[in-house]
Image (cartoon, coloured by chain):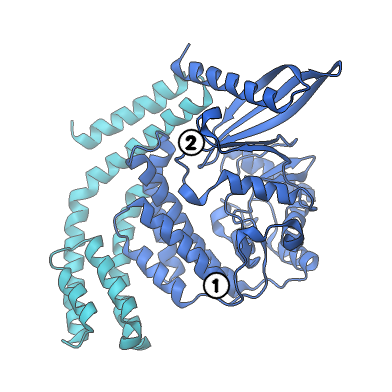
Amino acid sequence: MSQQTNVNDALIARITAYISSKLPQATGLRLDGVERIAVGWSHETWLFDAVWEEAGAVRRQGMCLRRDPGNALLRHLSDLGEQYRVLQALENTPLAAPKVYWFERDTAILDAPFLVMEKVPGSCPNPWGREGRAFYQAAADRGVLPQSFTHTLATLHTLDWRAAGLEFLGVPAAGTEFARREIAKWRELIALSEHPPEPILTDLIGWLEANAPSSSRVTLVHGAYRTGNLLIHDDRISAVLDWELQVLGDPMYDVAYVLSDLNREGTPLLSNLVDRDAFYRDYEAATGFTIDDEICRYYNALYAMRSVAFWMSASGLYAAGRSQDIRLARTRWSVPVVLDRAARELGY
Amino acid sequence: MSPDELLRRIAQTLKQEIGPAVLEAYPKTQAFMASVVLEKLARQIELAPAHAVAERSEVAALESDLNAFFANDAPAGVAAAIAGLASAPNSVGLDAVVAALYAARNELGTERFEQALGRVRQTLRAGVDRQMVYAA
């Protein structure tokens, strides 16, 4: 038996004990099909079915546990406590999102903060792999999932975030504050990465600061709305996942991400799934918003800055010995790739 | 065997022998990713001497062009950054020049700012093109 297996067995026993403590009526609780999934850059993700007896009946509930080992790519900008509050707030909205059960900041329980949420039925094909691309192409041909993709984004952008209690995310003032807040956030992450100076990045940031767009509309913004972060069941979006980058701000920030070349490979379909014209038509009809191409181009450049910040942070975590995940070391070579893209955004 | 050849050999072993033999998904991914890292590192090491020569040459040409462009009339911060290229003919020196140009943007006026930055961008493009040979 490998050392890793021993570690996992010990962790599973502690998770079992924790969930048992949260379900005092349950007897004989066990975890079935425990699986650590190798996705995401921030938190460990564990999927399992909790099975127990209660009032003479066997109960089974799919669960997802996310644990923050303290070496998240987003560092202090990714907080499971905030994710918990966001998912709680979304529970009473029309947006499809996982129901969240518990959050614990106490590291005595599982050595790190963690949250437990519902395992929503569905799958999340990787849009970068051959199988995933084929899956999304077939779904695009059927036409149902692309509409669900667009309508789910429209639901996200039109939900009443004040009524949902999401003001704690911070409400930007009208004007350039939203863009400036994002620039400041990613500057901070870049500084923490202790990466050597990159002149193209300095050029990009100078340009972004000089051209920050004014926006007055404030909605919930997911921050990473694309296939791969959306759970799919019966050809529809069954849950929006990956609540790490959400903010209140300009909905065009999400729209720009959907339109971005970053999220499709070898296909004109947005996010490997949605016809561009159909997206414009359906999104504008569902939200009443007009897509502003110029602002989306600006946000696309801002995403280049954000990507550089991600990869600098990731490779910095590996270089500093804070993570053993070799995928993070690999991102050292993602920095010039994104800088090349950024330079092209700036016209050179 | 040169260092880059050695790294390529190890990468090949990881990809063709170690990775396929690992059953658990997470460590299997790690083995394949390690092979990718070593391949990229090998290429970077192989190209490093030629790239360093090209960078020094291009930065020297940039310094000369910027000095001619400003003709002793550069704002103090810009002048200092250009002078710094002699001792830091690399991304550190270039970064200082870009930052100084943006800081002096109002003083320079739009036309001079864009002309000077445009010249710096030629050098930056050449640099990132070199990096893309091993990074992409």
Residue shown at the point (32%, 60%) measured from the top left: A198
Q: Quadrant of residue A320?
A: top left
> Looking at this view, is B58 or A162 the one in front?
A162
Determine whether, in the image, residue A204 is placed left or right of residue B95: right
Chain A palette colour:
blue
Picture layout, residue A347 above or below residue A116: below
The chain holding disc 1 is A
Earlier-in-chain disc, 2 versus 1: 2
Q: Quadrant of residue B3?
A: top left
Picture layout, residue A235 above or below residue A306: above
The amino acid beneath tag 1 is Glu
Determine whether, in the image, residue A335 is placed left or right of residue A63: left
Q: Quadrant of residue A214?
A: bottom right
Picture layout, residue B112 above or below residue A307: below
Task: Read off the residue under disc 2.
Answer: A69
Q: Which chain's colour is cyan?
A: B
Residue shown at the point (78%, 70%) measured from the top left: A288
Is residue A278 at least partly visible in the picture? no
**Outermost left residue:** B87
Give the structural element (helix, strand or loop) at label 1: helix
How many badges with numbers are in the image? 2
Labels 2 and 1 in the same subunit: yes
Residue shown at the point (18%, 71%) measured from the top left: B61
Distance from Cα at disc 2 to Cα at disc 1: 32 Å
Q: Position of residue A105 (x, y in %)?
A: 56, 38
- Quarter placement of the N terminus of chain B: top left
* The disc label shown at residue A177, or none: 1
Q: Position of residue A177 (x, y in %)?
A: 55, 72
Give the structural element (helix, strand or loop) at label 2: loop
The amino acid beneath tag 2 is Pro
Is residue A1 at least partly visible in the picture? yes
